[in-house]
Image: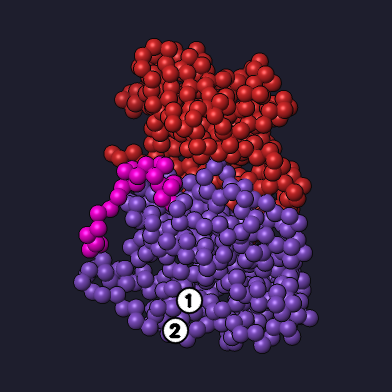
Chain colours: A red, B purple
Amino acid sequence: MAEKVKLTSIAELGEFGLIDHINEKVKIKHKETIKGIGDDAAVLQFDKQQTVITTDLLVEGIHFDLMYTPLRHLGYKAIAVNVSDVVAMNATPKQVTVSLAMSGKFSVQAVDQIYEGIHAACEEYGVDLIGGDTTSSVTGLMISVTAIGTADPKKIVYRSGARENDIICVSGDLGSAYVGLQLMEREKEVFKANPNVQPQFQGKEYLLSRILKPTARLDVIKKLAENGVQPTAMMDISDGLSSELIHICRQSDTGCRIYDDKIPFRQDTVTAADEMNIEPLMAALNGGEDYELVFTISPDDYEKIKDQEGISFIGHMTNKSKGMYLTPQHGEEIQLKAQGWTAYKSE
Amino acid sequence: MAEKVKLTSIAELGEFGLIDHINEKVKIKHKETIKGIGDDAAVLQFDKQQTVITTDLLVEGIHFDLMYTPLRHLGYKAIAVNVSDVVAMNATPKQVTVSLAMSGKFSVQAVDQIYEGIHAACEEYGVDLIGGDTTSSVTGLMISVTAIGTADPKKIVYRSGARENDIICVSGDLGSAYVGLQLMEREKEVFKANPNVQPQFQGKEYLLSRILKPTARLDVIKKLAENGVQPTAMMDISDGLSSELIHICRQSDTGCRIYDDKIPFRQDTVTAADEMNIEPLMAALNGGEDYELVFTISPDDYEKIKDQEGISFIGHMTNKSKGMYLTPQHGEEIQLKAQGWTAYKSE
């Protein structure tokens, strides 16, 4: 970095200083948030609504690479992926807690950049930051977020509610996050070989934004509610379409069938995938990190959203005995496999 | 390790296998837990009660050393320290989520040992394990826990409620966790120099248990409620008595005065501290990790608990202008300082 700014070490600020420094920028939005940061625990008050809680851990070197991930984007993403899980329950995100572990190398300015992203995401999704824990790590940066949401008990959507003949829908487009990631990995190798070469990202901004700053589709569940559609099952696509459909089928005790020509791809995803010899279909099925929603609806609800922009109808649920398959336009049927989970690859 | 058991790698089990493996042993205890592990988020239902949420991150090399921390104890401790924060709000712990990050070196059997401790703690404190995230790390083990509790809004105790003349109380004994930690550090150095030397822990089991398997004092808040005592402020002692009292004074806008001869020490703590040239008073003030409760009560409530075993009355709150001091039996007054927070020591 070429910045000449004097950086403050976290040790200089001390515990009380760091907590105050972080709290200064927190504004509470929800009346349910009785007490946020600053005591042993936050205090919330919900009535009649059910509470939805989810947690996710982002680990340096596994989920992100600081060589190409701006800290601000990282903070944003940590919130967005948790909000995405609340949204996937068809609930309204309300609060988040954030725990950070980082090595002594990090400055207060680095912490500020992470929190800038956290605040931007809290603003965008309308959630209150209510607590957390900040500590040191021997190596590397780790962010653990817990998100809390509420919903009318009748509106919550589980993975287990899909029935035979329900229509499988996905929001947005798929595969772009994986292609974006490969693009960054490629440029990183080029940069390592020759630091004078500038990265070639022109026209690929969307693909990069998909992996660096994913969006939780709060807008999609709002739109479904406006149209009177209650999904029968729903998940967010973090591990790849294939893995998520398997979860829904297993918990709903069904099979499923999807069609490759129905899967939504953007042209820039296909073009960049071609350049790198990536099969876009595989990026959608197994790449993960798109954070779009995959959900099932009763056939009776199809009319209500068939013209809705940004929703694709990619197949239907079947009897369990039919298994879980993708039917391509050309060639043999492909059995869906959970290859998306790369966090424990044997090496 | 001398075990000859064939270990299963986490990669062999795969994502679905690992989730099922962990879920098998989870039993739901609370009617408020509508849905636990197995969807995008857990679902809880609270009525009238307020919800208390806290989160803590335990990092290998910072908060624990696997050379002397059995994995089972680590799992137990991760739950206990979070339950302790809920208890410190005078709330009843109800649910926990657990996120684990660990390197590929860990076997499924190692994960099982961590979860054995987690389940033992969940059983002891009557909490439901409702979710989490399990992922890989490049180096080291990290455990992030979020705990949820409930309380009648009128019963919740904040740090900010202490008033001038309130009596400062602590549960149990102090300094033992720090002395236990130093004991283990010393034996580790001996072992590194000569692996054939057996550790000298006879008669020091209590001190070791204090650091390896701390207890959340759920029993203390139950006893206070039975005696009709509502603390005016309360915290659990994780960073040392000094740091916690500063938090209470700052938030309550008061000063405080405590007396060294009132601070509860066990004889084995004092003996072991002497052997290692540790000042027991410094272990209590700045050592941390005792996970006892420090709380303030109105002088009117003193009669109700003055004979209660396991509660010591160590001083009183003062006007803010009087500062925060310890009065020793001999020598000069000591100003309380927040030295307990060692997570960001400059090196």
- Please give the name of the residue rendered at 70% of the width and 62% of the height, measured from the top-left corner: B151
Amino acid at circle 2? Asp
Subunit of label 1: B
Horizontally, residue A208 falls left or right of residue B250, namely: left
Q: Is residue A189 above or below residue A136?
A: above
Image height check: is A203 above or below A167?
above
Q: Which residue occupies the foreground of this view, A269 or B96?
A: B96
Quarter of the view holding residue A40: bottom right
Give the class, few, some or many, for how many residues have Cα within 10 Å of label 2's Cα (few <14, many ≥20).
some
Q: How far apart are marks 2 and 1 (CA)?
A: 8 Å
Towards the viewer: A269 or A29 = A269
Q: Give amino acid for label 1.
A: Ser
In magenta, the rendered stretch is B1-22
Tell me the residue that label 2 is attached to: B268
Residue B28 vs residue B228, the one in the foreground: B28
Q: Does the magenta stretch include residue A346?
A: no
Residue B259: numbered disc: none
Q: Earlier in the sequence, mark 2 or mark 1?
A: 1
**Residue B16 on the magenta segment:** yes
Q: Position of residue B55 (x, y in %)?
A: 57, 54
Please state the horizontal and vertical placement of residue A46, each as a whole percent of the image. Answer: 73, 50
Q: Which residue is drawn at 52% across and 57% down?
A: B27
Q: Give the residue at x 22% y 63%.
A: B2
What's the residue at 47%, 18% (across, down)?
Answer: A259
- Kindly indicate whether the residue at mark 1 contacts the one at mark 2 (C-beta within 8 angstroms): yes
Task: Find numbered disc 1 in the image and state the secondary structure of the residue it sits on.
Answer: helix
Camera-nearest residue between B339 and B306:
B306
* Residue A21 shows in this picture: no
Quarter in which the C terminus of chain A is drawn: top left
Q: Position of residue B236 (x, y in %)?
A: 60, 67
> Count of labels shown?
2
Check disc 1 and report the residue beneath it.
Answer: B176
